[in-house]
Image (cartoon, rainbow, N blue to C red):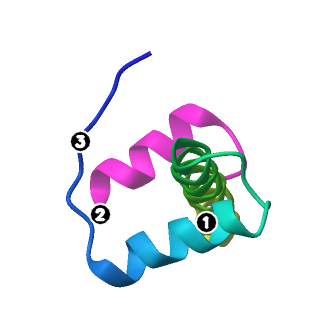
């Protein structure tokens, strides 16, 4: 496992400390790991939502490729 040293603004350090003090997390590293996991999951959800908004191409791939080349 890699260890990173990251400067944090005071308000984020206070947030981390509150999470540990409240018992929501066992230690500071676990707070950061959880936050990164949630960010990663959110990005995956956003990627799926973006993909769902993409137009769906149906039909023969050769015909579709010709149409795309002519645009």
Q: Quadrant of residue 48?
A: bottom right
Who's the residue at 66% across and 53% down the image?
A: 41
Answer above or below: position of 16 versus 29. Answer: below
What residue is pinned by disc 2? 71
Label 3 residue SS: loop
Secondary structure type for disc 2? loop
User: Residue visible at 29% across and 63% down?
Assistant: 71
Instruction: Give the residues drawn in magenta, as a range.
Output: 54-71
The vertical placement of 29 against 17, above or below, is: above
Mark 1 = which residue? 46
Sequence-first disc among 2 and 1: 1
Q: Nearer the viewer, residue 52 or 47?
A: 47
Query: Quick one: 7 or 61, which is closer to the camera?
Result: 7
Mark 1 or 3: in front is 3
Residue 38 x, y percent position in the rendering = 64, 57
Q: Residue furthest top?
A: 1
Label 1 Cα neighbours within 10 Å, binned few <14 / some 14-19 / many ≥20: few
First reached walking from the N terminus: tag 1 or tag 3: 3
Whether residue 12 appears in this view of the structure is yes
Q: Where is residue 69 drawn, in percent x and y?
A: 30, 48
Numbered tag placed on residue 5 in the rendering = 3
Q: Give the Cα separation between the discs numbered 2 and 1.
A: 29 Å
């Amino acid at each position: 496992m890699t260890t990173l040293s990251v400067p944090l603004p005071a308000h984020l350090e206070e947030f981390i400390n509150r999470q540990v003090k409240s018992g929501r997390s066992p230690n500071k590293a676990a707070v950061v790991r959880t936050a990164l996991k949630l960010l990663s999951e959110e990005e995956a959800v956003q990627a799926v939502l973006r993909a769902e908004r993409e137009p769906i191409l149906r039909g023969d791939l050769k015909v579709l490729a010709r149409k795309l080349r002519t645009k």
